[in-house]
Image (spheres, grey):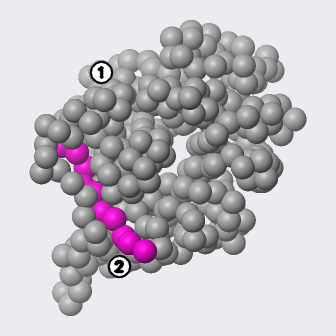
Amino acid sequence: MTKVITIGSATMDVFVECDDANIVSVCTKDHSSDFMSYPYGAKIDITTFSSKVGGGGINTACNFAHLGFDTSAIFKIGEDIYSEGILEFMKTQNIKLDNIIKRNDISTGFSIILVSFQGDRTVLAHRGANAKILENEINFDAIKDADFLYIAPLNGDSNKVLEPIVDYAHKNNTRICFNAGTTSLKKGMEHIKKILSSVHIVVMNKEEASMATGIKVRPDTKTEKFSQELIHPDVKEMLKTLKVKDYQIIVITDGGRGAYAYDSKKFYFCEPYPSEVISTLGAGDSFASTFCAALGRTRLDIGKSLMYASVNSSSVVSKFGATEGLLTFDEIEQKLKERPEYTYLLG
């Protein structure tokens, strides 16, 4: 059985949905942005409230375990009521807990997720222990023993362990999937290149890819209609810029518009698999980890792996929680059989 180890965050997520939330869109000549807003100074009733375990390290570990991999996870928590909830949840997920870091002098990560009526969300995050992973706390032997290392975003001081674990995994022939965090991206492309040169699969969303490369996706103008192209030329340029080694596969996700991939020879595009959207939290984690896992299942068929990832991600967004809708490979393949017209395209 393939051994996978993930490293990333672990949080207790509190979901809050309010019907009074507004979505405000602002567009300039160079780019457009969406904002969630509430009446200033008002006291607003909550429509829906719930608590779930989440975080990139946990979400991806749960997915790999669900897909049948021998899975372990590295993350850091405190000794508080939130850590108790996280550990109780993890015991139900068939994930090895040997490599969890626990400290009594720091708080467990905690997030408040503001969910819009469209299903998208804004996250208010207290990093806590997630931002304090130290190099000497990591079990490097577990990384060496794994076939595959999935690196979820490492923010704050935890980002300092990124280069050591990537170098170690690369030297010990452990394949690496890298999903960058904002701390890394803010350091610029020259810093990111050092990491990219050792990883096999890179997954970012469009906003992260723009931050890393400095390339902005231009909106349509009177004279140029970029939206008519299957893959925006600026997205293609991002994909090419992020690819620094021939053997790498680069993936950029674009929310409800779909996902793109590049392998030096071809550009791939895959629309979202149709589903009802309840909450998009965890969609990126399920997409990225499923894509990595599916490459083995599909014998490195990039387009088909994008389809697998889209199906699993669509199931996650149809539930209220980052790990609630995770599917097995058999369930993913059954959904694809139900929609034979659903496929990927080459750009």
Q: How far is the residue under mark 2 from the one under mark 1? A: 40 Å
Residue furthest to the right = 136
Q: Nearer the viewer, residue 287 or 291?
A: 291
Q: Is residue 307 left or right of residue 157?
A: left
- Give residue 48's mark: 1
Specify which label sits upstream in the sequence, 2 or 1: 1
Q: Is residue 68 left or right of residue 338?
A: right
Q: Name the residue under label 2.
A: 233
Q: What element carries label 1?
A: strand
State the extent of the magenta-drawn residues as a range: 265-275
Q: What element carries label 2?
A: helix
Where is residue 3 drawn, in percent x and y? 61, 32
Task: Indicate the quadrant where residue 116 lies.
Answer: top left
Where is residue 315 drawn, in percent x and y? 28, 33
Visible in this render: residue 115? no
Task: Indicate the quadrant where residue 17 lies.
Answer: top left
Q: Does the magenta stretch include residue 266?
A: yes
Where is residue 55 drawn, in percent x and y? 54, 32
* Count of all numbered marks drawn on residues in the image: 2
Q: Nearer the viewer, mark 2 or mark 1?
A: 2
Q: Is residue 263 above or below residue 117?
A: below
Q: In this view, does 226 lie above or below 63?
A: below
Name the kind of residue labelled 2 in the image.
Pro
Where is residue 279 drawn, in percent x and y? 31, 34
Q: Which of 219 and 251 is in front in this view?
A: 251
Q: In this view, does 10 lie to the left or right of 51?
A: right
Visible in this render: residue 165? yes
Per the picture, the main secondary structure of the magenta-coloured stretch is: loop
